[in-house]
Amino acid sequence: MLRWLKALHIIAVISWMAGMLYLPRLYVYHCATVPGSAESERFKVMERRLLKQIMTPAMISAWSFGILLVLTPGVLDWSWGWWHVKLAAVIALSGFHGMLSRWRRDFLADRNRRPQRFYRIANEAPTLLLVLIVIMVIVRPF
């Protein structure tokens, strides 16, 4: 059962991360469209589907399977320091997910005021958090 939980957790995380890396890129391209244009409306549909149908269910699944893993006896030694850092990074990633959702609402209402460069830089945050999380889980430096 533990292997199934781990597998489902990893699948959910990969699905979530795919969206976390792609949605800011869609925002970069959306910035180049004229508000109200057919192209802008197409981006709105793509962004909604990615966030609502893939990213949010994947995030909920990643959290659910992760919590089940943590609650499984013998999986985690609560004295290890690495999991605190991992948890903080996952919370930060969840917060970034919320920011992506807020930015989508701005695009939906044709109220985006941020330039492409902002979203290009924001696109790096999930990668940095992912690197930190993987190092904590695999290397367990402390």
Image (cartoon, rainbow, N blue to C red):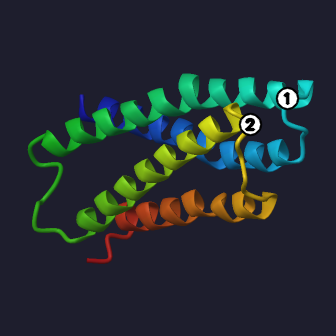
Please state the horizontal and vertical placement of residue 136, each as a whole percent of the image.
Answer: 36, 66
The residue at the point 32 percent across, 77 percent down is 141
Identity, as a three-letter code, of the amino acid under mark 2: Asp
Camera-side residue: 70 or 59? Answer: 59
Question: Quarter-wise, where is residue 89 in the image?
Answer: bottom left
Q: Residue at x 64, y 61 (%)?
A: 122
Work out which quarter of the rendered image holds the N terminus and state it: top left
Q: Are the residues flagged by discs 2 and 1 in contact, CB closer than 8 Å?
A: yes
Q: Distance between the residues labelled 2 and 1?
A: 7 Å
Q: Relative to the observer, which residue lies in front, 54 or 1?
A: 54
Amino acid marked by disc 1: Gly
* Snapshot quadrant of residue 134: bottom left
Of marks 2 and 1, which one's residue comes earlier in the chain? Answer: 1
Rate crowding at label 1 as few (under 14), some (14 to 19) or many (20 or more) other CA atoms within 10 Å.
Answer: few
**Residue positioned 84% across, 45% down in the render:** 29
Residue 53 horizontal side relative to residue 12, left or right: right
Query: Which residue is at 68% across, 31% downward?
Result: 108
Local SS, label 2: loop
Q: Mark 2 points at which residue?
A: 110
Mark drawn on residue 36: 1
* Element assignment for label 1: loop
